[in-house]
Amino acid sequence: AATVPASGGEGEVVGNQEIESLIESLPKLPFLVEGHIYKYDGFWYIEDHLRAVLSCKKHFRFEDSDILLATFPKCGTTWLMAILYAIINRHRYPIGSEDHPLLTNNPHSLVRNFELNLYNKNAIPDLSNMPAPRLFATHAPALSLCDEVKNNSGCKVVYVCRNPKDSVVSFWHFLGKLKPEAASRLSFDEFFDSFCSGVITFGLFWDHVVDHWKASLSMPEKVMFLSYEQIIEQPDHYVKKMAEFMGCPFSSVEEDEGVVNGIVKMCSFSHLSQLEVNKSGRTQNGVRHDSFFRRGVVGDSKNLLSSEMINKIDRITEEKFSPHGLTI
Ligand code: A3P
């Protein structure tokens, strides 16, 4: 029998057979694009992601100094990977140096995602030589809000949300690049409805956001809650906040030397998207790097969403967020 509790607590997964049995036992629905989508711990996962999440829960152990970037897809993961990486590694890789790794590597190669890169395809990575602080990323609430994170004394989660109207539109465009054939068989209306009902990988968007928001209120020293829009509006301010939260604040000398603004500029959409590596390369999963850089603005959704769609998303957002005092 499966030993990972469906509640998503810190259950021990004894082996692949247990993972397979658990997956078999979960509610599932046909997925829009292909295959099935499974409900685990209140959220929907496509099979590959779910298998990787369960494997990660079995094999990965958080260390006190770990930093985890948690996002719903298309909420600014790539950007924040770059920013957090630049902040954490600024003494090893000074900002402005010609050989900074972000100039020749896509952020997804420098900050590995648990379920997309590290534990997918039955891989069990050896992370023993990774220097502290280790920086990882995930879209999975089952990892970013697991008991181990809550109980571990030091590790921290930086959560970034985005206006759902821009997220759904960004997701739709990304799907078109990731799986053009499958996307061409789908209408945006169908995709939009799946997003709103939550039957989309890592959905439901609103629950994803609210769970992290609540965690940030109850454990402010462990979970930092930010939005894409906030960071776009005041990037220098939030880069400083993130550094403080992660325990590596900027010194006044660094501030005087323009290190904060150097990070903002290096990680800006206009800079990153024009680097050769981001115009031409692919991730280890074959995803084109340029598909992570589309427009990078706030409010682009108005170009695709009908007024009915806008009303629907606004209504769900109000219903889901206002009881928790959350506005984004
Ligand atoms: P758009 O599709 O609205 O342009 P993720 O990295 O989570 O997949 O999110 C992708 C979204 O973030 C895309 O949004 C992308 O253009 C935007 N993005 C990528 N890099 C960015 C950057 N450096 N600054 C701001 N936005 C960025």
Image (cartoon, rainbow, N blue to C red):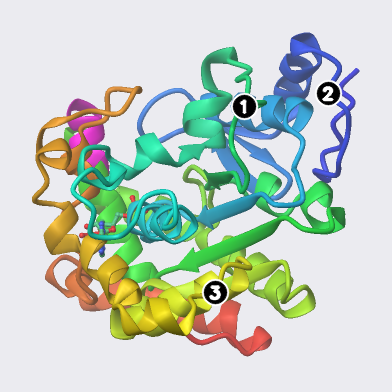
- How far is disc 1 from disc 2 in space, using C-alphas? 25 Å
Callout 3: few (<14), some (14-19), or many (20+) C-alpha neighbours within 10 Å? Answer: some
Please say if 98 is above or below 159. Answer: above
Q: Earlier in the sequence, mark 1 or mark 2?
A: 2
Q: How many marks?
A: 3
Please say if 182 is above or below 237. Answer: above
Which stretch did the figure color magenta?
Answer: 175-183
Q: Residue sitting at 44 percent across and 61 percent down? A: 87
Read off the residue under disc 3.
249
In the picture, the disc for residue 129 is 1
- Residue nearest the observer in this picture, 227 or 132: 132
Q: Position of residue 8 (x, y in %)?
A: 80, 43
Please say if 12 is above or below 97. Answer: above
- Residue nearest the observer in this picture, 232 or 21: 232
Q: Residue sitting at 83 percent across and 46 percent down? A: 7
Question: Quarter holding the C terminus?
Answer: bottom left
Q: Is residue 174 visible?
A: yes
Read off the residue under disc 2.
13
Foreground: disc 2 or disc 3: 3
